[in-house]
Amino acid sequence: MKIEDSDGYLRLKASVMEDCSRGEDCFNPDGCNKQQGCIKCFHRYCDTFKWVIDRANHYSEKLGIPATQILDSWEKSRDYWYMNYYQNCNQPLIETDQVRVFDTVDDMLKAFGEPKFRCPFCGGISSSPYECNSGLTVEIIGQTSVCNWKVYGLFLGKGIYVFCKDKLRGETIFMPVAWEKQEEVG
């Protein structure tokens, strides 16, 4: 199946075309083709559409999974505006040391070892990969409180993106402590 025939492609295209219709009604799947961009649709919706398709093809190439399945999975998971959902932090390139790919969720859990994750804010160890429960206190704008930093908040770029092929899904988590030790050795 060609990506253009997939449910994910058609759903995303409909969303982008709806936004474009409020602008200059100039949808172009290859990105904005106006010299200065579309004046009324200043978000460059077509450029985001092209970015998503390019990123799905990148994932396909790196993971050996059809781009149609990748895009369908993303679109099934997307429950908010595509302009906010499709970003490098949510679908990073799979070619950096901040991205790890696993065949199964079980493989990923085994790689974590003990459930210990480094909070990027306080530096403590949390048992949750998503929210700090280290018990350490931090000072924020003159106020002292117990750290409860969350991976999905303003994130300081110190997490790691994990992708599980069996679920066709990826997410950012706190760095597993076991992986810190591997990096020190390697």
Image (cartoon, rainbow, N blue to C red):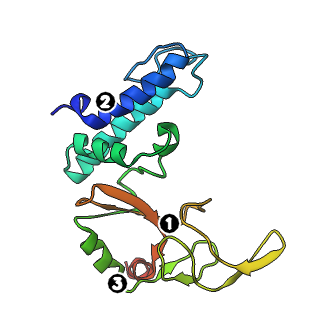
- Label whose residue precedes the other's in the sequence (1 or 2): 2
Q: Which of marks 3 and 1 is nearer the N terminus?
A: 3
Determine the CA span between mark 2 and mark 3.
40 Å
Q: In which quarter of the image is the N terminus?
A: top left
Q: Name the residue under label 3.
A: 113
Query: Whole-percent x and y of residue 85?
Result: 48, 45
In this rendering, the answer to whether 138 lies above or below 94 is: below
Q: What residue type is labelled 2?
A: Leu
From the viewer's perspective, is the residue at label 1 or at label 2 nearer?
Answer: 2
Residue on which the image places disc 1: 159
Q: Which of 60 and 27 is in front in this view?
A: 27
* Three-letter code for the amino acid on which mark 1 is drawn: Gly
Disc assigned to residue 10: 2
Q: Position of residue 13 (x, y in %)?
A: 37, 28
Q: Position of residue 126 (x, y in %)?
A: 52, 81
Question: Residue at the location (44% across, 81% down)?
Answer: 184
Q: Dot 3: within a 10 Å radius of its alpha carbon, few (fewer than 14), some, or many (20 or more) residues?
A: few
Picture residue at 36% right of the left edge, 54% below the top: 95
